[in-house]
Image (spheres, grey):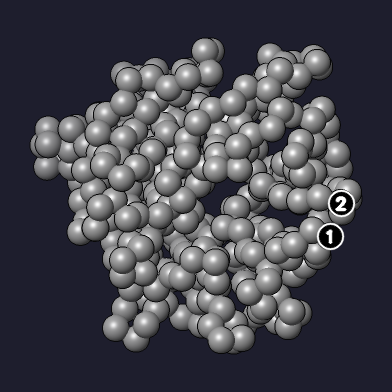
Amino acid sequence: MLNEGITMADLPVHTIVFEILTRVPAKDVGRSKSVCKQWYALLSTQDFVRIHCSRSLVSSNQRVLLIDDLTCSVHPIIFQSNDYGPSSIVTFPFHHHNNDVSILSHLNGLLCVCLNHTYELLLWNPTTTAFKHLSTPDSHGFYINNLDAIGLYVDADDDYKVLHIKRRSGVLGVYVYSREVDSWRNIPFITRQEYLSPHFNWSAGTFCGGTLYFNVCECWVGGTNVVICFDVNSEQFKEISFPLVPSTGMVQGVLVNVKNELHMFASTGMFEMTIDLWTLQGDYWIKVLSCPPIPPISLSLWCDITHYVTNGNWFVMTKLGKLFTIEMDMKPFECFYPVTWFRGFKCAVFVETIVSPSI
């Protein structure tokens, strides 16, 4: 932002280049690095990466990544028509077996993924193709589905970190990986013993306002549902209540970061699901809107919630990447736009950035 009275001609050339290139698409930044050594050095600084990332977090830069048995593809989102644009095929830059890659978390263009045949964790930027193995010889960085939980976040020092909650034979361990120092360390976690049980399912962490949030739900009808909060700077945990939803039927909560405010889509029911949207204010949930029961969706396609509510439509993505449109009899909910967080094991909505998985 230029101060009043200052023109572009008054600025140094490197400042002009900086201001222009922090506004171009991520792939164009990669090409611009080859212009000269000075540009390469400028575009590789952490200040440039941070500011470019902040300016890239807009809906036009969102992409959908879909993994199937044969291909991995990236699609632009055409929000006006509730559809995907032409796809481009992505080649995994790391060794894998038949696309056995699960997406566990993502933030600012980085994906935290698991190689299912080895249980190894990786950080991967599908836009730049850069990746980093997080597994170590002392057994850190290995993920087991249905027992572990992962959250990706950035702290006040702009260090990207991975929180790994591990449950092994009734013992819970919590570990933090730092991109800055490229190592894992253990941190304390005091919680109720029953959450160690495999009867409780932990969601992936959703990063919002300096805190990682996890839904912890008992795996049967009428079970306990809570939200576990992790302050990423103090590294302290606390528990808050789940929204007040009916306890009859299945209960599923999907956390979403919308403009740095935490929302939850809470679905309840059996054959027809009722979905409510809640927002977190302090430690309490406030209901924003209710959706009438939606038509049955095949259990083989049962979904996580993503995209946006606007123009009277609510868009739902299944774990297999199929989109459903729910028409809502309500005025446009203009304050809720395309979300920056969605993750299924084989699909994700992410933003194209130049954030690197390693320093």
Residue 345 lies, with reference to residue 78, above or below; the image says: below
Give percent across and percent down for residue 65. 39, 38
Task: Give the x, y percent position of residue 332.
Answer: 74, 16
Q: Which residue is mark 2?
A: 248
Q: Quadrant of residue 95?
A: bottom left
Query: Residue 157 location, x and y as percent?
Result: 49, 61
Res 160 → quadrant? bottom left
Residue 338 appears in view: no
For the point 47% across and 56% down, which residue is it? Answer: 104
Q: Earlier in the sequence, mark 2 or mark 1?
A: 1
Residue type at tag 2: Thr
Q: Residue at x 52, y 57 (%)?
A: 153
Give left or right: position of 65 versus 37: right
Label 1 sits on what residue type? Gly
Work out whether residue 176 can be spotted.
Answer: yes
**Alpha-carbon neighbours of circle 2 within 10 Å: few (<14), some, or many (≥20)?**
few
Write down the residue under mark 1: 222
Circle 1 packing at 10 Å, graded few (<14), some (14-19), many (20+), is: some
Q: Are marks 2 and 1 in contact (CB under 8 Å)?
A: yes
Q: CA distance from mark 2 to mark 1?
A: 6 Å
Check disc 1 and report its element: helix, strand or loop. loop
x and y, in percent, of residue 260 in the image = 65, 42
